[in-house]
Image: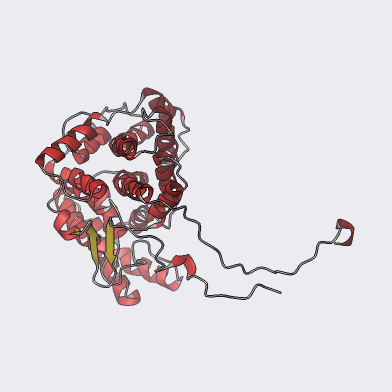
Protein backbone atom coordinates (compact mmCIF):
# COMPACT_ATOMS: atom_id res chain seq x y z
CA UNK A 1 0.00 0.00 0.00
CA UNK A 2 1.38 3.38 -0.97
CA UNK A 3 0.98 6.61 0.92
CA UNK A 4 -2.07 8.61 -0.15
CA UNK A 5 -1.34 11.27 -2.72
CA UNK A 6 -1.57 14.92 -1.75
CA UNK A 7 -1.18 18.10 -3.79
CA UNK A 8 2.40 17.44 -4.82
CA UNK A 9 4.61 20.26 -6.02
CA UNK A 10 5.19 20.32 -9.79
CA UNK A 11 8.26 18.58 -11.12
CA UNK A 12 11.37 20.68 -10.68
CA UNK A 13 9.37 23.02 -8.41
CA UNK A 14 8.36 24.94 -11.52
CA UNK A 15 6.72 28.29 -10.56
CA UNK A 16 6.76 27.39 -6.86
CA UNK A 17 7.56 30.47 -4.76
CA UNK A 18 10.27 29.35 -2.32
CA UNK A 19 11.56 32.66 -0.93
CA UNK A 20 11.06 36.40 -0.90
CA UNK A 21 13.78 38.59 -2.37
CA UNK A 22 14.29 42.22 -3.36
CA UNK A 23 17.32 41.49 -5.56
CA UNK A 24 16.01 40.34 -8.92
CA UNK A 25 12.65 40.16 -10.70
CA UNK A 26 11.75 38.19 -13.84
CA UNK A 27 8.59 38.86 -15.81
CA UNK A 28 8.29 35.80 -18.00
CA UNK A 29 5.33 37.03 -20.03
CA UNK A 30 6.82 40.43 -20.87
CA UNK A 31 10.42 39.20 -21.08
CA UNK A 32 11.69 41.64 -18.46
CA UNK A 33 14.67 41.26 -16.12
CA UNK A 34 15.14 43.75 -13.29
CA UNK A 35 18.01 44.12 -10.82
CA UNK A 36 16.74 45.97 -7.74
CA UNK A 37 14.11 47.63 -9.95
CA UNK A 38 16.44 48.60 -12.82
CA UNK A 39 15.65 47.08 -16.21
CA UNK A 40 18.49 45.09 -17.77
CA UNK A 41 17.97 47.04 -21.01
CA UNK A 42 18.83 50.19 -19.07
CA UNK A 43 21.76 48.76 -17.10
CA UNK A 44 23.48 46.64 -19.75
CA UNK A 45 24.51 49.36 -22.23
CA UNK A 46 25.16 52.05 -19.63
CA UNK A 47 26.51 50.66 -16.34
CA UNK A 48 29.84 49.17 -15.36
CA UNK A 49 29.80 45.69 -13.87
CA UNK A 50 31.18 47.19 -10.65
CA UNK A 51 28.12 49.45 -10.41
CA UNK A 52 25.88 46.40 -10.76
CA UNK A 53 27.83 44.52 -8.09
CA UNK A 54 27.33 47.42 -5.69
CA UNK A 55 23.64 47.57 -6.62
CA UNK A 56 23.10 43.87 -5.92
CA UNK A 57 24.88 44.03 -2.56
CA UNK A 58 23.55 47.35 -1.27
CA UNK A 59 20.23 47.89 -3.04
CA UNK A 60 21.15 51.21 -4.67
CA UNK A 61 23.44 52.30 -7.47
CA UNK A 62 26.60 53.90 -6.05
CA UNK A 63 27.35 57.60 -6.12
CA UNK A 64 30.80 58.60 -7.42
CA UNK A 65 32.49 58.26 -4.04
CA UNK A 66 30.95 54.84 -3.44
CA UNK A 67 31.87 53.71 -6.96
CA UNK A 68 35.46 54.86 -6.49
CA UNK A 69 35.57 52.93 -3.22
CA UNK A 70 34.23 49.66 -4.60
CA UNK A 71 36.49 49.93 -7.66
CA UNK A 72 39.50 50.38 -5.38
CA UNK A 73 38.44 47.61 -3.00
CA UNK A 74 37.88 45.07 -5.76
CA UNK A 75 41.17 46.03 -7.43
CA UNK A 76 43.09 45.71 -4.14
CA UNK A 77 41.72 42.19 -3.60
CA UNK A 78 42.38 40.71 -7.05
CA UNK A 79 45.52 38.78 -6.22
CA UNK A 80 45.12 35.19 -5.03
CA UNK A 81 47.06 33.81 -2.03
CA UNK A 82 50.21 31.98 -3.13
CA UNK A 83 49.19 28.63 -1.52
CA UNK A 84 45.99 28.68 -3.59
CA UNK A 85 48.02 29.29 -6.76
CA UNK A 86 50.08 26.21 -5.85
CA UNK A 87 46.85 24.21 -5.53
CA UNK A 88 45.80 25.46 -8.96
CA UNK A 89 49.10 24.37 -10.47
CA UNK A 90 49.03 20.98 -8.73
CA UNK A 91 45.61 19.82 -9.94
CA UNK A 92 45.62 17.29 -12.82
CA UNK A 93 45.27 18.63 -16.33
CA UNK A 94 42.41 16.18 -16.84
CA UNK A 95 40.26 18.10 -14.34
CA UNK A 96 37.64 20.35 -15.94
CA UNK A 97 37.86 24.12 -15.38
CA UNK A 98 34.72 24.01 -13.22
CA UNK A 99 36.20 21.29 -11.01
CA UNK A 100 39.30 23.41 -10.58
CA UNK A 101 37.29 26.56 -9.88
CA UNK A 102 35.15 24.77 -7.30
CA UNK A 103 38.22 23.38 -5.53
CA UNK A 104 40.19 26.61 -5.47
CA UNK A 105 37.26 28.80 -4.35
CA UNK A 106 36.77 26.37 -1.48
CA UNK A 107 40.49 26.59 -0.64
CA UNK A 108 40.27 30.41 -0.51
CA UNK A 109 38.15 30.07 2.63
CA UNK A 110 41.14 28.84 4.63
CA UNK A 111 43.08 32.01 3.80
CA UNK A 112 40.32 34.56 4.36
CA UNK A 113 41.36 37.02 7.11
CA UNK A 114 37.81 37.03 8.54
CA UNK A 115 37.85 33.28 9.12
CA UNK A 116 35.13 30.65 8.88
CA UNK A 117 33.23 31.51 12.07
CA UNK A 118 32.58 35.22 11.57
CA UNK A 119 29.16 35.43 9.92
CA UNK A 120 28.54 39.08 10.72
CA UNK A 121 27.38 41.43 7.97
CA UNK A 122 30.65 43.43 7.84
CA UNK A 123 32.72 40.24 7.63
CA UNK A 124 30.48 38.75 4.96
CA UNK A 125 30.63 41.91 2.87
CA UNK A 126 34.43 41.72 2.99
CA UNK A 127 34.27 38.03 2.02
CA UNK A 128 31.96 38.92 -0.87
CA UNK A 129 34.44 41.56 -2.04
CA UNK A 130 37.33 39.09 -1.99
CA UNK A 131 35.33 36.41 -3.76
CA UNK A 132 34.17 38.79 -6.47
CA UNK A 133 37.68 40.15 -6.98
CA UNK A 134 39.51 36.81 -6.96
CA UNK A 135 37.17 34.60 -9.00
CA UNK A 136 38.13 36.25 -12.33
CA UNK A 137 41.81 35.95 -11.37
CA UNK A 138 41.43 32.24 -10.66
CA UNK A 139 39.51 31.76 -13.90
CA UNK A 140 42.22 33.50 -15.93
CA UNK A 141 44.90 31.44 -14.14
CA UNK A 142 43.01 28.22 -14.96
CA UNK A 143 43.10 29.16 -18.64
CA UNK A 144 46.80 30.07 -18.60
CA UNK A 145 47.81 26.88 -16.78
CA UNK A 146 45.76 24.71 -19.16
CA UNK A 147 47.49 26.38 -22.10
CA UNK A 148 50.96 25.96 -20.56
CA UNK A 149 51.40 29.73 -20.42
CA UNK A 150 52.93 31.83 -17.63
CA UNK A 151 50.46 33.47 -15.29
CA UNK A 152 49.59 37.10 -15.92
CA UNK A 153 49.03 38.65 -12.52
CA UNK A 154 46.24 41.16 -11.97
CA UNK A 155 46.79 44.87 -11.96
CA UNK A 156 45.19 47.44 -9.69
CA UNK A 157 44.05 49.48 -12.66
CA UNK A 158 41.23 49.06 -15.12
CA UNK A 159 37.77 47.58 -14.77
CA UNK A 160 37.12 43.97 -13.86
CA UNK A 161 36.26 43.21 -17.48
CA UNK A 162 39.45 44.83 -18.78
CA UNK A 163 41.66 43.22 -16.16
CA UNK A 164 40.15 39.77 -16.71
CA UNK A 165 40.82 39.87 -20.46
CA UNK A 166 44.33 41.20 -19.80
CA UNK A 167 45.06 38.25 -17.48
CA UNK A 168 43.52 35.76 -19.95
CA UNK A 169 45.42 36.87 -23.03
CA UNK A 170 48.41 38.82 -21.71
CA UNK A 171 47.64 41.98 -23.63
CA UNK A 172 45.39 45.01 -23.41
CA UNK A 173 41.89 44.23 -24.68
CA UNK A 174 40.49 46.46 -27.38
CA UNK A 175 37.48 48.63 -26.67
CA UNK A 176 34.86 46.31 -28.22
CA UNK A 177 36.10 43.22 -26.37
CA UNK A 178 36.24 45.09 -23.06
CA UNK A 179 32.72 46.46 -23.63
CA UNK A 180 31.47 42.99 -24.55
CA UNK A 181 32.94 41.39 -21.45
CA UNK A 182 31.55 44.14 -19.21
CA UNK A 183 28.10 43.70 -20.74
CA UNK A 184 28.26 39.90 -20.50
CA UNK A 185 29.18 40.13 -16.82
CA UNK A 186 26.17 42.39 -16.22
CA UNK A 187 23.79 40.11 -18.11
CA UNK A 188 24.81 37.03 -16.11
CA UNK A 189 25.06 38.71 -12.69
CA UNK A 190 21.79 37.42 -11.25
CA UNK A 191 18.64 35.60 -12.28
CA UNK A 192 16.44 35.18 -9.22
CA UNK A 193 16.11 31.64 -7.78
CA UNK A 194 17.91 29.71 -10.50
CA UNK A 195 19.35 26.35 -9.47
CA UNK A 196 22.76 27.61 -8.35
CA UNK A 197 21.40 30.60 -6.43
CA UNK A 198 18.86 28.41 -4.66
CA UNK A 199 21.65 25.98 -3.76
CA UNK A 200 23.69 28.86 -2.34
CA UNK A 201 20.75 30.11 -0.28
CA UNK A 202 20.01 26.63 1.09
CA UNK A 203 23.61 26.33 2.28
CA UNK A 204 23.63 29.86 3.71
CA UNK A 205 20.41 29.12 5.59
CA UNK A 206 22.22 26.52 7.70
CA UNK A 207 24.45 29.39 8.95
CA UNK A 208 27.40 27.90 7.14
CA UNK A 209 29.91 30.42 5.78
CA UNK A 210 29.90 32.56 2.63
CA UNK A 211 32.45 30.33 0.89
CA UNK A 212 30.41 27.17 1.47
CA UNK A 213 27.36 28.91 0.02
CA UNK A 214 29.07 29.98 -3.20
CA UNK A 215 30.79 26.61 -3.60
CA UNK A 216 27.29 25.09 -3.52
CA UNK A 217 26.39 27.52 -6.27
CA UNK A 218 29.44 26.57 -8.34
CA UNK A 219 28.60 22.89 -7.96
CA UNK A 220 25.10 23.48 -9.30
CA UNK A 221 26.32 25.76 -12.11
CA UNK A 222 28.69 23.03 -13.30
CA UNK A 223 25.74 20.87 -14.31
CA UNK A 224 25.05 20.90 -18.07
CA UNK A 225 21.36 21.70 -17.51
CA UNK A 226 22.34 24.97 -15.84
CA UNK A 227 25.70 26.51 -16.68
CA UNK A 228 27.02 24.50 -19.61
CA UNK A 229 24.45 25.25 -22.29
CA UNK A 230 26.54 27.84 -24.16
CA UNK A 231 29.40 25.33 -24.32
CA UNK A 232 27.00 22.85 -25.93
CA UNK A 233 25.82 25.52 -28.38
CA UNK A 234 29.36 26.28 -29.54
CA UNK A 235 30.25 22.61 -29.86
CA UNK A 236 27.16 22.17 -32.05
CA UNK A 237 28.20 25.11 -34.24
CA UNK A 238 31.71 23.71 -34.57
CA UNK A 239 30.35 20.28 -35.40
CA UNK A 240 28.11 21.68 -38.16
CA UNK A 241 30.94 23.89 -39.37
CA UNK A 242 29.23 25.48 -42.37
CA UNK A 243 26.01 27.41 -42.82
CA UNK A 244 25.19 25.30 -45.87
CA UNK A 245 24.90 22.28 -43.56
CA UNK A 246 22.61 23.91 -40.99
CA UNK A 247 19.28 22.81 -42.50
CA UNK A 248 20.26 19.17 -42.78
CA UNK A 249 21.85 19.03 -39.32
CA UNK A 250 18.99 20.78 -37.53
CA UNK A 251 16.32 18.73 -39.30
CA UNK A 252 18.23 15.63 -38.21
CA UNK A 253 18.17 16.85 -34.61
CA UNK A 254 14.42 17.41 -34.88
CA UNK A 255 13.91 13.95 -36.38
CA UNK A 256 15.85 12.33 -33.55
CA UNK A 257 13.81 14.37 -31.05
CA UNK A 258 16.98 15.74 -29.51
CA UNK A 259 17.18 19.02 -27.67
CA UNK A 260 19.02 22.00 -29.14
CA UNK A 261 20.83 23.83 -26.36
CA UNK A 262 20.23 27.54 -25.97
CA UNK A 263 16.47 27.51 -26.57
CA UNK A 264 13.54 27.73 -24.21
CA UNK A 265 13.45 28.85 -20.61
CA UNK A 266 11.62 27.88 -17.43
CA UNK A 267 10.37 31.43 -16.88
CA UNK A 268 10.48 33.44 -20.11
CA UNK A 269 7.63 32.90 -22.58
CA UNK A 270 9.07 35.45 -24.97
CA UNK A 271 12.62 36.43 -25.87
CA UNK A 272 15.13 36.30 -23.04
CA UNK A 273 16.06 39.99 -22.68
CA UNK A 274 19.71 39.04 -22.24
CA UNK A 275 19.73 37.33 -25.64
CA UNK A 276 18.74 40.62 -27.28
CA UNK A 277 22.06 42.21 -26.31
CA UNK A 278 24.22 39.17 -27.03
CA UNK A 279 22.78 38.74 -30.53
CA UNK A 280 23.94 42.27 -31.40
CA UNK A 281 27.38 41.68 -29.90
CA UNK A 282 27.80 38.38 -31.73
CA UNK A 283 27.21 40.19 -35.02
CA UNK A 284 29.49 43.13 -34.10
CA UNK A 285 32.35 40.86 -33.08
CA UNK A 286 31.91 38.70 -36.19
CA UNK A 287 32.12 41.77 -38.42
CA UNK A 288 35.19 43.00 -36.56
CA UNK A 289 36.91 39.62 -36.96
CA UNK A 290 35.89 39.34 -40.62
CA UNK A 291 34.23 36.03 -39.74
CA UNK A 292 30.42 36.23 -39.64
CA UNK A 293 30.02 32.48 -40.10
CA UNK A 294 29.20 31.72 -36.48
CA UNK A 295 26.68 34.56 -36.21
CA UNK A 296 25.04 33.64 -39.51
CA UNK A 297 24.80 29.98 -38.52
CA UNK A 298 23.31 30.95 -35.17
CA UNK A 299 20.72 33.20 -36.79
CA UNK A 300 19.83 30.43 -39.26
CA UNK A 301 19.37 27.91 -36.44
CA UNK A 302 17.31 30.41 -34.46
CA UNK A 303 14.87 30.83 -37.35
CA UNK A 304 14.55 27.06 -37.86
CA UNK A 305 13.87 26.40 -34.17
CA UNK A 306 11.29 29.18 -34.01
CA UNK A 307 9.51 27.86 -37.10
CA UNK A 308 9.52 24.23 -35.95
CA UNK A 309 9.37 24.44 -32.14
CA UNK A 310 8.20 28.01 -31.46
CA UNK A 311 11.00 28.41 -28.94
CA UNK A 312 12.89 31.61 -28.27
CA UNK A 313 16.64 31.54 -27.75
CA UNK A 314 17.96 32.23 -24.27
CA UNK A 315 21.09 33.90 -22.90
CA UNK A 316 23.26 30.90 -23.72
CA UNK A 317 22.62 30.77 -27.45
CA UNK A 318 24.37 33.92 -28.65
CA UNK A 319 26.84 34.07 -25.78
CA UNK A 320 28.48 31.02 -27.41
CA UNK A 321 29.43 32.73 -30.68
CA UNK A 322 30.12 36.00 -28.83
CA UNK A 323 32.76 34.41 -26.61
CA UNK A 324 34.19 32.36 -29.48
CA UNK A 325 34.69 35.51 -31.56
CA UNK A 326 36.67 36.94 -28.64
CA UNK A 327 39.02 33.94 -28.72
CA UNK A 328 37.77 32.43 -25.48
CA UNK A 329 38.08 28.61 -25.36
CA UNK A 330 34.77 26.78 -25.09
CA UNK A 331 35.66 25.07 -21.79
CA UNK A 332 36.07 28.49 -20.15
CA UNK A 333 32.52 29.68 -20.85
CA UNK A 334 30.99 28.34 -17.62
CA UNK A 335 33.79 29.61 -15.33
CA UNK A 336 33.23 33.06 -16.86
CA UNK A 337 29.55 32.66 -16.02
CA UNK A 338 30.66 32.01 -12.41
CA UNK A 339 32.79 35.18 -12.40
CA UNK A 340 29.63 37.14 -13.06
CA UNK A 341 27.14 35.13 -10.99
CA UNK A 342 29.43 35.42 -7.97
CA UNK A 343 27.85 38.85 -7.51
CA UNK A 344 24.38 37.32 -7.38
CA UNK A 345 25.34 34.38 -5.16
CA UNK A 346 26.99 36.65 -2.62
CA UNK A 347 24.07 39.11 -2.73
CA UNK A 348 21.57 36.32 -2.10
CA UNK A 349 23.72 34.91 0.69
CA UNK A 350 23.78 38.32 2.37
CA UNK A 351 20.02 38.63 1.95
CA UNK A 352 19.39 35.11 3.29
CA UNK A 353 21.50 35.71 6.38
CA UNK A 354 19.83 39.08 6.96
CA UNK A 355 16.48 37.39 7.65
CA UNK A 356 17.33 33.74 8.01
CA UNK A 357 15.22 30.68 8.47
CA UNK A 358 16.52 27.18 7.77
CA UNK A 359 15.24 26.03 4.38
CA UNK A 360 13.66 22.64 5.01
CA UNK A 361 10.94 21.68 2.48
CA UNK A 362 8.98 18.44 2.52
CA UNK A 363 8.75 15.69 -0.08
CA UNK A 364 5.60 13.87 -1.08
CA UNK A 365 6.29 10.26 -0.11
CA UNK A 366 5.30 7.76 -2.83
CA UNK A 367 6.66 4.52 -1.35
CA UNK A 368 4.93 1.74 0.62
CA UNK A 369 3.74 2.42 4.19
CA UNK A 370 2.87 -0.99 5.74
CA UNK A 371 5.79 -3.37 5.46
CA UNK A 372 6.89 -5.81 8.16
CA UNK A 373 10.42 -6.89 8.89
CA UNK A 374 11.22 -10.54 8.16
CA UNK A 375 14.36 -12.37 9.29
CA UNK A 376 16.91 -12.86 6.55
CA UNK A 377 16.17 -16.59 6.40
CA UNK A 378 12.60 -15.83 5.31
CA UNK A 379 13.44 -13.33 2.55
- Any part of residue 181 in sight: no
State left or right for residue 298 relative to residue 202.
left
What is the image's colouring? secondary structure
39 in relation to 15, above or below: above
Residue name at image x 15 percent, y 45 percent: 62
Extreme residue in the right direction:
377
Extreme residue in the left direction:
64
Residue name at image x 34 percent, y 61 percent: 262
- Please state the horizontal and vertical placement of residue 273, each as a whole percent of the image: 23, 63
State left or right for residue 281 relative to residue 126.
left
The quarter of the displayed image where residue 243 is located = bottom left
State left or right for residue 195 relative to residue 312.
right
Residue name at image x 47 percent, y 55 percent: 359
- Please state the horizontal and vertical placement of residue 69, each as a whole percent of the image: 17, 35
> Looking at this view, is 312 or 54 the one in front?
54
- Any part of residue 202 in sight: yes
173 in relation to 80, above or below: below
Extreme residue in the top direction:
82
- Please state the horizontal and vertical placement of residue 212, each as a whole percent of the image: 44, 41
Amino acid sequence: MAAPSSSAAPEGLEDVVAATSSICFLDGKQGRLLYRGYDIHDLAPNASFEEVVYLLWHGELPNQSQLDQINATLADNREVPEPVIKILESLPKTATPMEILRTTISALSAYDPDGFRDNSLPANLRKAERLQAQTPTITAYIHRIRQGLPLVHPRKTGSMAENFLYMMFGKEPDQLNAHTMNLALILHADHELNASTFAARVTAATLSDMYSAVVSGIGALAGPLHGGANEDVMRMLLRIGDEAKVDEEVKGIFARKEKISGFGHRVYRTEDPRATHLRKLSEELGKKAGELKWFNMSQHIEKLVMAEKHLYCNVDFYSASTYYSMGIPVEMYTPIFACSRMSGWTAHTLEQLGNNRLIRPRAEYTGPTQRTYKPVSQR
